[in-house]
Amino acid sequence: MKARFKYRIYPTPGQKYRLAKLFGCVRVVWNDSLACCQEKYQLGEKKPTNSELQKQLITQSKNTEDREWLSEVSAIPLQQSLNDLNQAYQNFFKSTKGQRKGRPIRPPKFKSRKSKQTARFTKGGFKVCQHKVYLAKIGRLKIVSPVRFTCCSIISNSNQRFRS
């Protein structure tokens, strides 16, 4: 079972800066991986695997002078960005083959600064407490939510259920 909750957060100015940096890094990793996949397609090669993209665009890029700022944010949202791109490609290919119900899906496109800024964390990158949520390398963000949580309310099992 997957659960999704919407929260209104109140970040401090320093947290706003770190969130903006996180969103920018996620967008850069998405755009770089999409460009790499499109380049491979034009050359007639197969799409690189997720692990190859992670090695090339996250791990090795952090060691270059041009992209060393990628190490200032948590690696979890960067990896999730690659997972999201992989899922977008799978949905597109299934749609073109007729294996997916509904209207045809377009191929993934590049993200811009003006589009909706998102970042996904897995259970190792966040922790929800009563009036705060902790995000890795961001800090504790003050939240307002309709659902009340007690500290450490996330159960670590395969279903990842939430208790109130």
Image (spheres, rainbow, N blue to C red):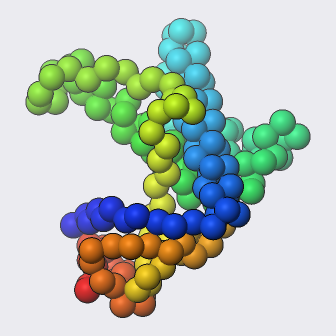
Q: Looking at the rendering, which quadrant does residue 15 occupy? A: bottom right
Q: Quadrant of the N terminus?
A: bottom left
Task: Using the rendered view, name the quadrant where residue 149 is placed.
Answer: bottom left
- Relative horizontal placement of residue 48, taking residue 130 as reference (left or right): right
- Residue appearing at x 30%, y 83% in the figure: 148
Q: Residue furthest left?
A: 101
Horizontal side of 49 relative to 93 (left or right) equals right
The location of residue 147, given as percent across then percent down, is: 27, 77
For residue 85, above or below residue 118: above
The image position of residue 21, as x and y in percent, is: 67, 49
Is residue 93 at all visible to an observer of this figure?
no
Seen as rendered, the residue at the extreme right is 65
Name the residue: 26% across, 23% down.
Answer: 105
- Residue 35 seen: yes
Where is residue 27 drawn, in percent x and y?
57, 38
Q: Is residue 68 above or below residue 76?
A: above
Q: Residue at x 63, y 36 (%)?
A: 28
Residue closest to the eye, 40 or 68:
68
Quarter of image, res 130: bottom left
Residue 79, image x, y percentages: 55, 50
In the rendered structure, the answer to whether residue 10 lies left or right of residue 90 reads: right
Which image quarter holds the C terminus? bottom left
Figure check: 104 above or below 14: above
Tally of marks: 0
Query: Is residue 18 shown left or right of residue 101?
Result: right
